[in-house]
Amino acid sequence: MTRFNLALRLLFRDSRSGELTILIAALIIAVTSSTAITLFADRLHRTMTLQAADFLAADLVITSPERISGTWLKKAGELALTRSETAEFSSVLMENDELLLAGVKAVSPRYPLRGFLKVTGADFSDEQIVASGPEPGSVWVEKRVLSALHLQIGDALTVGEKALTISRVLTYEPDKRGDFYSLSPRVMMHADDLPATGVIQPGSHVHYFFQFAGEAQSIMAFNRWVKPQLNPSQRIMDIHQDRPEVGNALNRAERYLGLSSIVVILIAGVAIAAATRRYSERHFDATAVLRCLGLKQKEILWLYGSQFFILGMLASAIGCLLGWFAQAGLFHLLHDLLPDAIASPSWFAVFFGFATGMAVLLGFALPPLLRLKRVSPLRVLRRDLEPLPSAAWLIYGLAIAIIAVLIWRYTEDFKMTGIIIGVGLIALLVLGSAVYGILWACQKLLPSLPLTWRFGVQGLIRNRQASVSQILAFSITLVAMTLSFTVRNDLLTDWQRQLPEQAPNHFVLNIFPEQQAGFQQDLDDQGLTGSRFYPIVRGRLVRINGIPVQKIVSKDSQGEQATHRDLSLTWSEQVPDENKILSGKWWTNDSPGLVSIEQKLASSLGVELGDKLTFTIGSEQLQAKVVNIRSVKWDTMKPNFYMIFSPGTLDGFASTSMTSFYLPENQKHFLNELVKRYSSVTVLEVDLILKQFQTILAQLTQAINYLLYFALLAGFTVLFAAVQAGLDQRIHEGALMRTLGAHRQFLRKTHIIEFALLGFSAGILAIGLSEIVLFALYTEVLHLNYRPNFLLWLVMPTLSGFFIGLAGFWGVRHVVDKPPVSVLREL
């Protein structure tokens, strides 16, 4: 207790004298930023996951061609899960001598479990939000059904053998998917009316969807219980696979949020290391006196370690409290942009913010503190006797290990963690050597420089190791800010580029070859722009290198899903837009028998270059050799394919074509004319999917903007603390120069030049390092197109030189006004 009391007294004295002000400020800012971003990211992730569940109308959905076992429903009841079900099928509707192939959806009373439906009345203007589907005896239809069959609200619509009354126009349903049943003109009816229609008979092609909702733990328990019992025709739907246009946006947003958190941690670590180094150097004399009084090395370490532990506990607690209010304020600012139902704050996220503060303090403050236990008692007589620094592996290894663990925790991505740490370390070693070389070269230029510039450059050269450390520290800070800013811009640009204002909102299938020219002419007459026509041949992958695919694919994998159904096969002379060749080469025009496969499917099936794939097309089989593997952006709302063949490979097989185009709302009537003119085609409308995607994208964009501003604010504040932490030596040197006759204005100019050169050098290194890391991140993790930003090469060094020079000048502005005697007495 005596030693603990001594530690408290020393801690209280240091806090009163201002010794710990910078370190406390850096730690509080770090924990506040980390806690706020962790809380915000956690709540945003759970909110978006909750909203993403709205896209499935449930927390978990099982799709099956037949009704599921009653045992499964009993198990769901035991876990207190609410459930609903829908049945989807195609049916030809006939009214007023008109025919229409529609997608019929029969829903149970509790549908939807998540999300809502939107309907309108006869005037089509007063849109209402409702929580359940139509009543028995009534039916809701999409607007195009009315115009195609010449019907109005209140008329009867016969589905099979059952006449139902049209009560409302359906304008929105949360789980509208991109399949044939969902994208045909929709008719929604009550499940109780389904038997009376007589449509569902043994052998009928029906898709059943069984929805479940409840507590997260119950959903996970039910998922684990039911998954092993699924047969090949049944599967559990997932937002990332079944709604890729939403899932991919969420994946990229989650990775960016993790990157934003890493930014604050890196900057905070730099500041804490600099502040602790200053603290330890200013306590060498006091530690030497304690050693003379009999304290052993381990007792010295315990004395200062306990102080920092108490300091870390208090600062982390304050930071967590401030972080809680910061994220609450951030959600308040964004309340108009986010969903009405926001997930509640997680106490685990608060605890993680607290633990992050302690971990960062340990990783970056412990190595400088270890020098204190090595202080020799002889220092009371020889002030120049400084303890040896800690081993390099300890100084850097501990910090790197802490950062690596935190990066993995934020991103949950080993690949991203390895890329950031590995590429960053290699680049820092190279850049550190380059800085040493630049400082050595600058020494040769000193005689030719003006006096103020000579003293400014000498301030950097005099202690090269410290200058290199500071330049690299500032470089890390600037790299973190640059990464956050650049990735944010490119991420949002990539999203916006995928969904331009006139993104295709209609897909047309089953266009016969002889209809293609006339169809294109009709689009041109209406002034509609569309994608190219893609030939389609339906076929199924049956063998890989002669081995049946059933022996290769794993259960519930993408490969299993793709091989249990017919695929849309096409051919092309050129690589389609938004496709990128990852391995192999594209073919020439006269190379039949070759095939290109999508990357994720190839990985799931274990397909490599040179493998032979066998397809069944109708009653015939076709073999093709894999010559390239490509990545596909499924969220571009354009036609995409797992398999693309070389021209000539599919000759002799019957084919149809598909295309996509944008149709404004005021030209919707054109669809009815199109279907009448080309009775064989199927028109799929994806307007609602686009609106859903654009809504969630707008919310993510605004949230990312605010996160960026918050991270940058924390970065500049901690950057100023890092500048302040290294000023003692310059203060003493300034006092000596004033004693020798230097004027205040001269000292101010040399300080500005020194810090400006420091910032300019850090800016140049930061640009080089950030470009390397960005290239690795874009190509290996985020899968974005990498383009060097030459504007940053001009802006970053200039801005960093200005701000770091200004921060350095601000930190020493009062020193030049102090009498030299008072400064020298502190030595």
Image: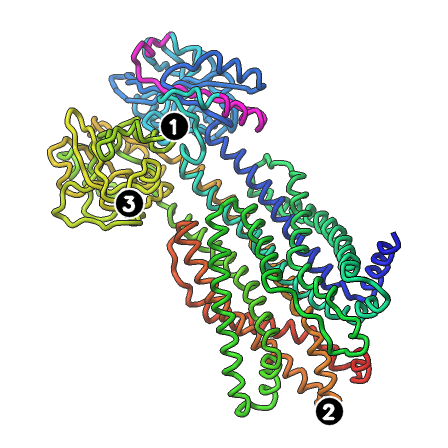
Q: Is residue 491 magenta?
A: no
Judge whether residue 522 can be spotted in this image.
no
**Residue matched to label 2:** 740
Q: Residue 669 falls in which quadrant of the image?
A: top left
**Residue matched to label 3:** 629
- Magenta part of the protein: which range? 196-225
User: Is 181 or 237 nearer to us in this picture?
Assistant: 237
**Which quarter of the rendered picture does the C terminus lie within?**
bottom right
Element at label 2: loop
**Residue matched to label 1:** 555
Residue at image point 49% right, 71% down: 764
Q: Residue 237 falls in which quadrant of the image?
A: top left
User: Is 183 or 323 nearer to us in this picture?
Assistant: 323
Between label 1 and label 3, give the one nearer the viewer.
1
The answer to whether residue 613 is above or below residue 367 is above
What amino acid type should be assigned to the residue bearing mark 1?
Lys
What amino acid type should be assigned to the residue bearing mark 3?
Ile
What amino acid type should be assigned to the residue bearing mark 2?
Leu
Q: Is residue 211 magenta?
A: yes
Q: Position of residue 121 (x, y in %)?
A: 45, 24
